[in-house]
Image (cartoon, rainbow, N blue to C red):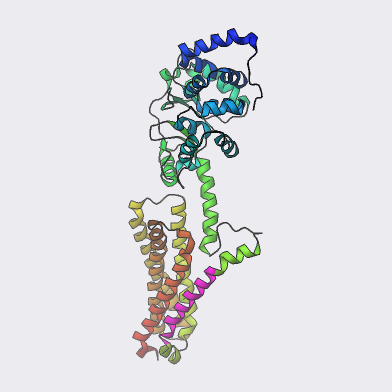
Amino acid sequence: MNSKTAAPHSHAPLLRLVKQYFEQDPLAAAHTMETMGSDDAAEVLKYLPSAMAAKTLVLLNDAFAAVLLEKVPESTFRKIGNRLDSQKATSILLRFSVEMRRKFLDLLDEKQKREIQELLNYPEDSAGRIMSINFIAFHGDTKVRDAVDKIRKLARRGTALSYIYVIDTEGHLTGIMNMRDMLLAESGVPLERVMRRDVFSVNYLDQVEKVANALSDHRYFVAPVVDNDNRLLGVVRAEQLIGDVQDAVSEDIQKMVGVGGDERAFSPLSQSLKTRLPWLHVNLATAFLAAAVVSLFEDIIAKLTVLAIYLPVVAGQGGNAGAQSLAIVMRGLVMREIPPHKAKKLILKETLIGIINGVVIGIVTGLIAWLWQGNPVLGIVIGLGMVVNLTVAGLSGAVIPLAMKAMHLDPAQCSSIILTTITDVMGFFAFLGFAVLFRNFLI
């Protein structure tokens, strides 16, 4: 922070003139500051009375206000920050890094600090949590030439430019400009005369899933994020959503096989064991459940031992078919491609696929069993068992993750284990049950 704290005595007349200017037309004075370099503007802010400085910051672009506050002494920041409205102070603090934000919060009075922290705590999986504060906004009465000059300076510093947002004196989002409109507009015209007023935006409380669907539907790569009063808070970019999705996919893949989402290749041995062993015990329990189903048919298996040969075939095909359905549905959930009103349609589709796969694979398996064992009835039994198992697999692969999502549980956490249990149990029960029905033709 700047270490200067007092104005030279020789500058007193100039400072009185500056204060008078801010008192008579604070809006014009604020806009004049926005056209200045940040160091010069910070010097002006530093020598204004704290009440006047706070009033000026309210009229400034939040991003520019944050830059100025970083350059003033801590004592000046404390005086100004405690006079700001908590909503405005929050909007400015969001422009800081997490470390700087924490440092500046500690300078504020407890009441102001508490109110701001409540506003800073955006809900999990909300647009506010993932939004970027790296955007450009101007007031509506800013002239096109002044905006272009500022954009050129920012571009030379490597600032990414896409859309230019237009706000009113209270920070409400009023319009948007793209670079083409700005370059074609007359230089002396205010932005509010040439801006586009039909602005697509998302609320900071909107779920990431809703935001992703909205961006996809409108084919936008960036959207402004606003609060409940339509104040501009930040922007959310498509690449940020993609990055979040990629992280989520990698974690979900690990969770589906009973590995912690945060485990890495060289995580400590204790962490790996802690996350894997519990799910291995769960898997062991489900395996015994499948074994218990097989034990119900000990008599028929003892009399017709050839049935045991086909048990792994039934289990393997059911597990693979269910995994295919599960993978498609899980991807759809992660990519936000499955709105609630289409869940029933997806379940019906996966079930139909399961039925068709079951019939085709059942016929192939039945023919192989007939040719191998020389018994056509055995082929019918294994074929019918395969139809039932693959139908259940398709249905379960779709229902399990969707049901867990509806119950606000993590679909990736145990969907695979539940699916394997259902396909093994139903596959064994169907195959051996048909064997009992046709036992007179098998023995």
Say if residue 373 shows up in the picture. Answer: yes
Q: Residue at x 52, y 68 (%)?
A: 279
**In the displayed structure, would residue 24 be above or below residue 64?**
above
The magenta span reads 278-297
**Between residues 2 and 132, which one lies in front from this camera angle?**
2
Horizontal and vertical percent for residue 88? 46, 30
Residue 300: image quadrant is: bottom left
**In the displayed structure, would residue 218 be above or below residue 358?**
above
Residue 192: image quadrant is: top left
Horizontal and vertical percent for residue 330? 46, 57
Q: Residue at x 45, y 32 (%)?
A: 87
Q: Main secondary structure of the magenta part?
A: helix
**Between residues 266 and 31, which one lies in front from this camera angle?**
31
Residue 241 is inside the magenta segment = no
Residue 290 is inside the magenta segment = yes
**In the displayed structure, would residue 73 be above or below residue 9?**
below
Q: Residue at x 38, y 69 (%)?
A: 392
